[in-house]
Amino acid sequence: MTTSSGASRRQVLAVAAAAATAPLIAGAPAEAASKPSKTWDLTVLGTSDTHGNVYNWDYYRDAEFDDSKHNDVGVAKLATLVNQIRAERKGKATLVLDAGDTIQGTPLATYYAKQEPITETGATHPMANAMNVLKYDAVTLGNHEFNYGLPLLATWIGQLGFPALAANAINEKTGKPAFLPYVIKEVALGGYDSPTLKVGILGLTNPGVAIWDKANVEGRLVFADMVATAAKWVPVMRERGADLVIISAHGGDSGTSSYGPELPNENPVALIAEQVPGIDAILFGHAHNEVPQKFVTNKATGVQVLTSEPSKWGQRLTRMDFTVTKVKGRWQVVSKSATTLNTNTVVEDPAVLAAVRGQHDTTVGYVNQVVAQSTEELSTVESRYKDTPILDFINHVQAEVVSKALAGTAYAGLPVLSQASPFSRTAVFPAGDVRIRDVAGLYVFDNTLEAVVMTGAEVKAYLEYSAKYFKTWAAGDTIDLPNINDPNVPDYNYDVISGLEYDIDIAKPVGQRITRLVLPGTDTPVAADAQFVVAVNNYRRSGGGNFPGIVKTQVYNQQQEIRQLLIDWAQAKGEIRPGDFFVDNWKLVRDGVPVF
């Protein structure tokens, strides 16, 4: 698989190989001279984690996007900022990069992957339409680019008017990069005689793809360590003439992973900056944080590597500014800085809106279809700390699908449990009409349904691991409900399980909190060697969140999308009535006393 035509790839590499300028250590101080050296400047603009957002629109609410901080979203907003800066810098060098997670995350993106997949219709993906108007210089593949399989990814890449990069995604059979590792852009710096600067851009994707999208990449792609890959390719880029090296990395900077040590680090940006010489700056994403400017000292050279992360969904645009000069025929960086710009300060770019208008309108029409009537309002507002009907709706549908599929098999006699997470704190099924967007707002990820067999001991260990989500609250303490959980554990890594009854004692230390785990309607403790089928989403089953005991061979895996199963169930029933699925089977306690 390649990210651009063979001709364009050969052209990029030929230009790089022909470059004669000798490399420099990134950011080396300019030599003192008898007269001031002339300087030029370069601006690099960066986006990341746009996640299918083009319009400033919330498809789940069918309204303009807004949040408590009045952020805006979308490539159309980003384009306005980019165009303003390009106009301001007319005649000067400006590059635009993206650090990945582009084609998944909104109903707009899902529609053109699932309902009318671009692989079947030949239509141009809305994110390709939008990004081509903005005229990016390169995009890095994020982990969510692999969600819909390699054929759809290849189709999208082929629709882009610029290269897609992922140096550490390796073809398992050939051992060679499956995508373009890097590009070297020759840019005119403007001004008298307009000298040129060769900017090397290296793309690094996230090794977690091997877990999170195992079904799509196993046996086809392997994902090398991001630090080692940078160490391999940065010298190559320098040898081929790169005067300035920028990494576009889909990984955070914390140095920690959401999975175990079986894969390379998920968030190694600071480590890359520290350990790999020759890097001037790193644009990064994946963690959805806003990091306007952060310098990391390279341990080998002492150079300060500039890093920046532009939040998520198009809420921010990173701006990196470099001042360069030539000393004895070689380019050197005199200064560099970064900041982030808020897209809520501008209007949407009309050209981007026009390029995606038809697809946006189609998606809005689709998500507003009524699928059922709800007998009462169901909300996720309390789902993190109370057993609520709306999460039981997910668990009921999952367990029902798996039970039917296993009828007549060796597993038919085992009780079926089910796992669900409170993905959204604001999802609501209103009383009356429930639309596709309401269901999509409850289940915002494109997960598929799987099932495995677990023992009673494994289920208890799983619940203990999940219960680390909560802070420890002594029996006499007043609980601050908005902050009841450990902020280091995201909501999507907290699970509730149906099919058994259990208590979570949040006054006890982590690892000792499941104080009651019994068979439904009884006081009979779950035996350690009892066996259960557990319905689970593919993210969790493949190791997402690093939950224990769940990464094992599936007894059910028909590649059915959970969101669509929920929609299908609601349409078939025509009515969503809590009495059909709600079972109050778990609760929070402190020293055995219920919290609520």
Image (spheres, grey):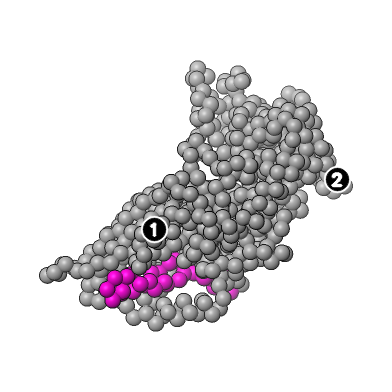
Query: Residue visible at 67% across and 64% down?
Result: 123
Q: Amino acid at mark 1?
A: Ile
Q: Which residue is mark 1?
A: 85
Q: Is residue 348 visible?
A: yes
Query: Residue visible at 63% across and 33% down?
Result: 380
Query: Residue visible at 48% across and 79% down?
Result: 11
Q: Magenta residues, as a range? A: 174-202
- Quadrant where the image shows the C terminus: top right
Q: Which residue is mark 2?
A: 407
Residue 369, x across and y down, in percent? 74, 44
Determine whether, in the image, residue 523 is placed left or right of residue 95: right
Taking depth in this image into account, of 521 and 388 the one nearest to the observer is 388
Residue 480, x across and y down, in percent? 50, 25
Asked whether 442 falls inside the magenta stretch, the response is no
State which tag comes first along the sequence, 1 or 2: 1
Is the residue 421 above or below the residue 287 in the image? above
Query: Residue visible at 33% across and 70% down?
Result: 189
Is the residue 572 above or below the residue 377 in the image? below
- Work out how far the residue at label 1 is from the one at label 2, CA to CA, in angstroms: 62 Å
